[in-house]
Amino acid sequence: MKTGDFRKSDLLRGAAIPEELLCALPKTDLHCHLDGSLRLETFMELGRAEGLEMPATVEAVREKYFPADRECCMPEFLKHFDHTGAVLQNTENLTRVARELALDFAADGVWYLEVRFCPLMHTQKGLTPDEVVSAVHAGLAAASAEAEIKTGIIITGIRTIDPVRSLELARLAVDWKGRGVVAFDLAGAEEAYPAKNHLEAFYHVMNNNQNVTIHAGEGFGPESIHQALHHCGANRIGHGTRLEEDPDLMAYVANNRVPLEICLSSNLQSCVVDDLSNHPFRYYMREGLRVTLNTDNTLFARTSPLKELKLAVNTFDLTLLETEHLLINGFKSAFLSEHDKKEMLQEALSTFSSLRDKFDLDNLDRRRM
């Protein structure tokens, strides 16, 4: 039932929104690290094969390699990647993990996934960066052949490496443009490692019309976001949690529709916020910023696309209309061709409407709204 342009179910909110609906809603994930998003069971299996000391129980493995203790802040948190990187040094493992990741996300209703990783971190046993990208691409392609999911690759540079190596990665991102790689990224410790140190890499990708997203405003203040935008040409901002500290810059980001790749569970785990109630997520949505919701690292943060959506809906008491708007932001912000983006957007909007009918949401008890 519609009343004008509105539906009664627009106001369904928070925990009253059925979990089955949240799972079925079309989603994107634009900020997902391959080496932070292995299945725990796969990490255990591959770790044993590589000779890593592997406790017998899942709980003990988590505690040993990926502790949830919130005293594990950013520098210690980044060390988690050393453990997963140790099992991702051959084509078979890279392909397997990429395939499993995409299939798991498809099962949670993700229609479009962008997977990011630094190829240099997977060359310890002789693979070339190009071979690393090829292996991940093969895994994602296999998943797309098995499930309804489209994927893209983001090649990630690291702030702490020699800028010459970043330029190598930028060239790789351009070489693979149109063949599965959709952007270049810069990640790693922000403080004392400014993005502008890697300007030559950014100039190369921009001069070759490749997309740019940069981790900024996660471990350092809004000046990091300013630099990502105005020095390095970022099309999107990874995290952007501290953008609220500079109202003028925030207005610029809002007015220019610069997407923010928000990762709630990860921000909490790595101490970017001390409590989700203090996360600017709801404030950013209210101020009209293009907020997208993402997992970052499913293994480290113990999350999934569905868990992350439930967390956002329940923590910030989102209405169904707000939830759909949040998900649409993801499709609008995807590094897709305009044709593919428009097609996927139209299909998502149609699916939103049909799911409301399927779950008969307009006739739910008004007390649940």
Image (tube, rainbow, N blue to C red):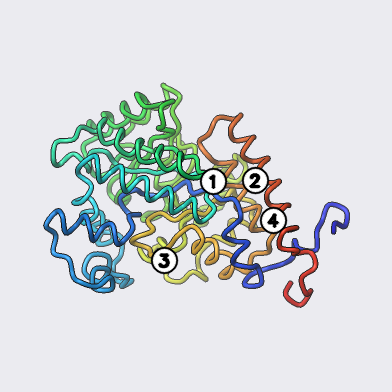
Residue 29, position as x, y percentages in the image: 49, 49
Query: Which residue occupies the extreme right position in the image?
Result: 4
* Crowd class of label 3 (few under 14; some 14 to 19; many from 20; radius 10 Å): some
Q: In the figure, residue 116 lies in which quadrant?
A: top left
Of badges 2 and 4, nearer the viewer stands 4
Return the residue nearer the eye: 140 or 230: 140
In 3D space, how far apart are the residues under numbered discs 1 and 4 (Cα atoms)? 15 Å
Mark 4 and mark 3: Cα distance apart in space: 31 Å
Q: Is residue 299 above or below residue 232?
A: below
Residue drawn at the location 19% of the way across and 57% of the way down: 47
Q: Label 1: few (<14), some or many (≥20) within 10 Å?
A: many
Choose the circle earlier in sequence order: 2 or 4: 2
Query: Which three-letter amino acid code belongs to the residue tagged 1?
Result: Trp
Name the element at disc 4.
helix
The residue labelled by disc 2 is 348
How many angstroms separate mark 3 from mark 1 (CA)? 26 Å
Per the image, label 3 sits on a secondary structure element best described as helix
Look at the image and tell me in which quarter the N terminus lies: bottom right
Q: What percent of the width, then of the height, locates residue 108?
A: 51, 56
> How far apart are the two marked residues, 2 and 4, measured between alpha carbons?
10 Å
Q: Quadrant of residue 68?
A: bottom left
- Residue tagged by mark 3? 268
Mark 1–mark 4 contact, CB under 8 Å? no
Calculate the distance from the C-alpha at mark 3 to the C-alpha at mark 2. 30 Å
Q: Position of residue 298 (x, y in %)?
A: 39, 58
Q: Nearer the viewer, residue 143 or 191?
A: 143
| Mark 4 neighbour class, 10 Å CA radius: few under 14, some 14 to 19, many 20 or more | some
Per the rendering, the mark at residue 331 is none
Residue contact at pointers 1 and 2, CB within 8 angstroms: yes
Q: For the residues labelled 4 and 3, say whether their Cβ atoms are less than 8 Å apart.
A: no
